[in-house]
C-alpha cells in the first residue's frame, strides 16, 4: 500500500511538472516589433460613393490603433515616424435577395467598401505599404414586414450598415499595419 501511494505521488508530481513547464516561455502581447513607434493617420479621402464613410473610417482606424497599444497616435505628420493614408476607392451594392412578390424589389443587399492604404516611413523616406487594397463587406436588410411600408427601407438599411462596414474595414487596415514585420 505504501509503495502504491509513493508511485502515485511520483506520477502526479511528474505530470504536474510536465504540464506547468508548457507555459514557461509564454509572453503577453504581440511578439513582433514594428519599424515605427508614432503614427499619424491622415483624414481619409473618399473617392467612392459611400455615404458618410470618410469620417467613420478615419475615427475607427484611430480607435483600432489605440486599442492595440503598440503605437502612439500623434496629431501631425512632423511628430510621426510613419504616416497612414487611406483612400476609399469603391463602394458596391449588390442585391442578394429579392421580394417573392416582385423580383424587381431587393430585400437584402451586400455592401462592399474598398480602401487603398499607403504607410510612409518618414525616417527612411520610403513606403512600408503602398497601394494595398483592403475590402470589407456586410449585409443590409431593406425591409421589415412589421414596420410601416412607406419608409425608405434601403436608405435606412444603408445608414445602419455603414458603421458596421467601416468598423470591419478599420480592423483590417489596423491588422495590415500592425501585422508581423
Image (tube, helix red, strand yellow):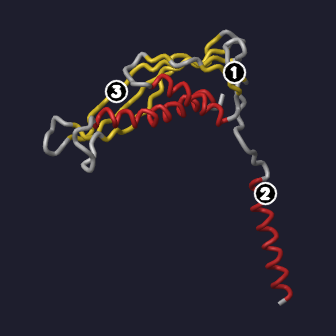
How far is the residue under mark 2 from the one under mark 1? Answer: 41 Å
Residue 21: assigned label:
2
In terms of depth relative to the viewer, which is nearer, 39 or 180? 39
How many numbered discs sit on the rendered protein? 3
Q: For the N terminus, which image quadrant?
A: bottom right
Marks 2 and 1 close (CB-CB < 8 Å): no
How far is the residue under mark 2 from the one under mark 3? Answer: 52 Å
Of the residues under marks 2 and 1, which one precedes in the sequence?
A: 2
Of the residues under marks 3 and 1, which one precedes in the sequence?
A: 1
In terms of depth relative to the viewer, which is nearer, 33 or 115? 115
Identified at 61% across, 14% down, the residue is 127
Which callout, 2 or 3, points to the residue nearer the camera?
3
Which callout, 2 or 1, points to the residue nearer the camera?
1
Q: Is residue 13 left or right of residue 155?
A: right
Q: Residues within 10 Å of mark 3 (few under 14, many from 20)?
A: some
| Picture coordinates of residue 180, whole percent (x, y) | 65, 31
User: Which residue extends farthest bottom?
Assistant: 1
Identified at 67% across, 19% down, the residue is 75
Q: Quadrant of residue 89?
A: top left
How far is the residue under mark 3 from the one under mark 1? Answer: 33 Å
| Picture coordinates of residue 8, whole percent (x, y) | 79, 79
Identified at 55% across, 16% down, the residue is 130
Give the residue pinned by disc 1. 74
Numbered disc 3: secondary structure:
strand
Give the residue pinned by disc 3. 92
Q: Residues within 10 Å of mark 1 (few under 14, many from 20)?
A: some
Residue 124 appears in the figure: yes
Amino acid at each position: 500500500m505504501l509503495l502504491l501511494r509513493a508511485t502515485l505521488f511520483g506520477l502526479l508530481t511528474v505530470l504536474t511538472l510536465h504540464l506547468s513547464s508548457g507555459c514557461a516561455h509564454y509572453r503577453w502581447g504581440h511578439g513582433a516589433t514594428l519599424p515605427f513607434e508614432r503614427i499619424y493617420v491622415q483624414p481619409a479621402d473618399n473617392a467612392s460613393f459611400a455615404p458618410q464613410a470618410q469620417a467613420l473610417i478615419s475615427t475607427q482606424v484611430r480607435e483600432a490603433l489605440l486599442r492595440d497599444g503598440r503605437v502612439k497616435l500623434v496629431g501631425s505628420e512632423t511628430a510621426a515616424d510613419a504616416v497612414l493614408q487611406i483612400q476609399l476607392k469603391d463602394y458596391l451594392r449588390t442585391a442578394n435577395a429579392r421580394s417573392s412578390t416582385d423580383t424587381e424589389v431587393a430585400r437584402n443587399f451586400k455592401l462592399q467598401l474598398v480602401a487603398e492604404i499607403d504607410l510612409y516611413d518618414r525616417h527612411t523616406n520610403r513606403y512600408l505599404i503602398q497601394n494595398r487594397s483592403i475590402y470589407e463587406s456586410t449585409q443590409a436588410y431593406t425591409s421589415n414586414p412589421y414596420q410601416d411600408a412607406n419608409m425608405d427601407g434601403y436608405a435606412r438599411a444603408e445608414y445602419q450598415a455603414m458603421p458596421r462596414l467601416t468598423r470591419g474595414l478599420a480592423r483590417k487596415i489596423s491588422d495590415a499595419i500592425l501585422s508581423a514585420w
